[in-house]
């Protein structure tokens, strides 16, 4: 199987084939490998060499995603990290799992920001500030906003699981703005997160207009709020 086909299978949830030298019998799908090796998150503490490889893969993925977008070939990520593709798949069974790990710090920042904004005396402005921060983060890597939108209805996807805390954090800010009468009651946090991803995607595709995201967010909010935010 070619590298391209193997990667396409991994990206869409199919079991990629493990190449020779990974300790898995030839021809066995990656799903079988994962059944034998449950992955670092469920395995307990990693050995020192495994931890080093994990961190090198994260660093390589961040650099590759920043340069070429989140659809960069996973083989290139492994090559940058100085490991084989089998090592990458042992740590990250598919692209979304790798993306989720890469963006863990950004999610932590957004969650901390949401908690701080709960003390803002202007509930509507607090919500808008947080939505702007999401758009900024989603625009950092080309392809991220599209991946987030695609994963929004797949509960088994690592990116969707990563976004669950974000939904809870956003719901707290939204409910506060709705109680203040600033945002329409029918607006849901799912709607807002989809809109922010769509805005980030539009901004990504129009790099020569840096003010586009803010304009689109302002236009969107006019239909969702009962006051100027």
Image: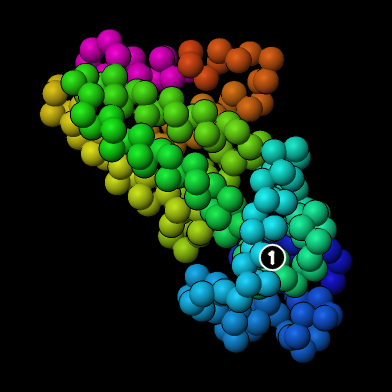
Q: Which type of secondary structure does the marked residue at label 1 adopt?
A: helix
Residue reaching furthest to the bottom: 25
> Which quadrant of the view contains residue 107?
top left
Residue reaching furthest to the top: 228
Can see residue 198?
A: no
Residue reaching furthest to the front: 48
Q: Which residues are magenta?
A: 216-229
Reading the image, the residue beneath label 1 is: 53
> Which quadrant of the view contains residue 15?
bottom right
The quarter of the image holding the C terminus is top left
Q: Going by the image, does 94 lie left or right of 219?
A: right
- The x, y position of residue 135, in whole percent, is 49, 29
- The x, y position of residue 121, in whole percent, is 18, 21
> Which quadrant of the view contains residue 126?
top left
Q: Nearer the viewer, residue 64 or 154?
A: 64
Q: Going by the image, does 227 lie left or right of 46?
A: left
Q: At x 75% / y 85%, what residue is drawn?
A: 23
Please check the rendered image and state whether residue 225 is part of the magenta-colored stretch, yes or no.
yes
Q: Going by the image, does 119 lie left or right of 217?
A: left
Q: At x 79% / y 65%, what residue is drawn?
A: 83
Please check the rendered image and state whether residue 77 is part of the magenta-colored stretch, yes or no.
no
- The x, y position of residue 108, in whole percent, is 42, 45
Can you say whether 214 is above or below 140 in the image? Answer: above
Can you say whether 111 is above or below 159 in the image? Answer: above
Q: Nearer the viewer, residue 163 or 1?
A: 163
- The x, y position of residue 78, in whole percent, is 77, 60
Q: At x 52% / y 28%, what residue is drawn?
A: 136
């Amino acid at each position: 199987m070619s590298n391209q086909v193997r990667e396409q299978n991994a990206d869409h949830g199919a079991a990629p084939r493990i190449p020779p030298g990974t300790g898995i019998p030839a021809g066995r799908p990656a799903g079988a490998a994962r059944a034998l090796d449950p992955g670092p998150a469920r395995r307990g503490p990693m050995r020192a060499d495994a931890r080093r490889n994990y961190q090198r893969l994260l660093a390589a993925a961040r650099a590759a995603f920043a340069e070429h977008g989140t659809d960069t070939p996973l083989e290139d990520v492994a090559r940058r990290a100085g490991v084989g593709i089998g090592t990458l798949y042992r740590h990250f069974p598919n692209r979304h799992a790798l993306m989720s790990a890469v963006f863990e710090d950004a999610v932590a920042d957004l969650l901390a920001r949401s908690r701080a904004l709960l003390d803002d005396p202007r509930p509507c402005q607090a919500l808008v500030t947080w939505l702007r921060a999401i758009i900024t983060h989603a625009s950092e890597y080309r392809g991220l906003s599209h991946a987030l939108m695609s994963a929004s209805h797949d509960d088994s996807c690592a990116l969707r699981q990563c976004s669950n805390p974000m939904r809870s954090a956003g719901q707290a800010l939204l409910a506060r703005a709705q109680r203040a009468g600033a945002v329409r009651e029918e607006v849901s946090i799912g709607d807002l997160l989809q809109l922010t991803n769509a805005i980030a995607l539009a901004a990504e595709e129009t790099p020569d207009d840096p003010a586009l995201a803010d304009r689109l967010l302002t236009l969107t909010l006019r239909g969702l709020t009962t006051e100027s935010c």
